[in-house]
Image (cartoon, rainbow, N blue to C red):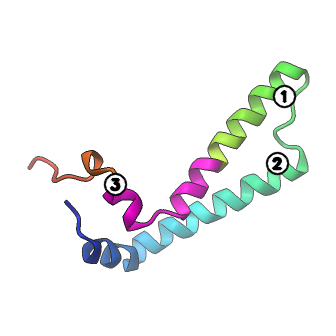
């Protein structure tokens, strides 16, 4: 299990910082594209599908950018030690 100190150290690594910056840029880009109508569709069904996919993608990127130690601590089954 990763402890809070290890998590905070991981968050300060250059590669980790770059990843979180990338996630934030993706989230902001999706919001901008949404405002520009990029995810519109030619008919109601395609419009609904495009909007749902865009919403889901943006939601995931936002959740990544807001990830805290408390979030992963509560999901122990996903953070345990990996087999060697």
Distance of label 3 from label 1 (alpha carbons): 36 Å
Location of residue 54 by image quarter: top right
> Reading the chain from its start, which is encountered first: label 2 or label 3?
2
Residue 81 in the image: state x and y as whole percent. Answer: 16, 53
Residue 22 in the image: state x and y as whole percent. Answer: 57, 64
Decide: marks 1, 2 in contact (CB < 8 A)? Answer: no
How would you rate the neighbour count of disc 1 (Cα within 10 Å): few for under 14, some for 14-19, many for 20 or more?
some
User: In the figure, is residue 20 to the left or right of 51?
Assistant: left
User: In the figure, is residue 10 to the left or right of 67?
Assistant: left
Residue at screen point 8% across, 50% down: 84
Residue 58 in the image: state x and y as whole percent. Answer: 66, 49
Looking at the rendered structure, the secondary structure element under dot 3 is loop
Q: Does the magenta stretch include residue 72?
A: yes
Distance of label 1 from label 2 (alpha carbons): 12 Å
Q: Mark 2 points at which residue?
A: 34
Distance of label 2 from label 3 (alpha carbons): 32 Å
Residue at screen point 31% across, 71% down: 7
Residue at screen point 26% across, 53% down: 79
Residue 59 in the image: state x and y as whole percent. Answer: 63, 49
What span is in magenta?
59-74
Q: 73 or 18: which is nearer to us?
A: 73
Decide: marks 2, 3 in contact (CB < 8 A)? Answer: no
Q: 63 or 20: which is nearer to us?
A: 63
User: In the figure, is residue 16 to the left or right of 26?
Assistant: left
Q: In this view, does 48 lie above or below 74?
A: above
Q: Is residue 23 magenta?
A: no
Q: Name the residue under label 1.
A: 47
Q: Name the residue under label 3.
A: 74
């Amino acid at each position: 299990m990763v402890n809070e100190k290890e998590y905070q150290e991981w968050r300060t690594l250059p590669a980790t910082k770059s990843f979180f910056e990338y996630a934030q840029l993706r989230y902001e880009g999706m919001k901008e594209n949404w405002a520009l109508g990029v995810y519109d569709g030619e008919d109601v069904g395609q419009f609904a599908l495009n909007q749902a996919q865009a919403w889901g993608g943006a939601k995931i990127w936002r959740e990544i950018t807001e990830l805290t130690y408390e979030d992963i601590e509560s999901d122990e089954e996903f953070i345990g030690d990996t087999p060697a």
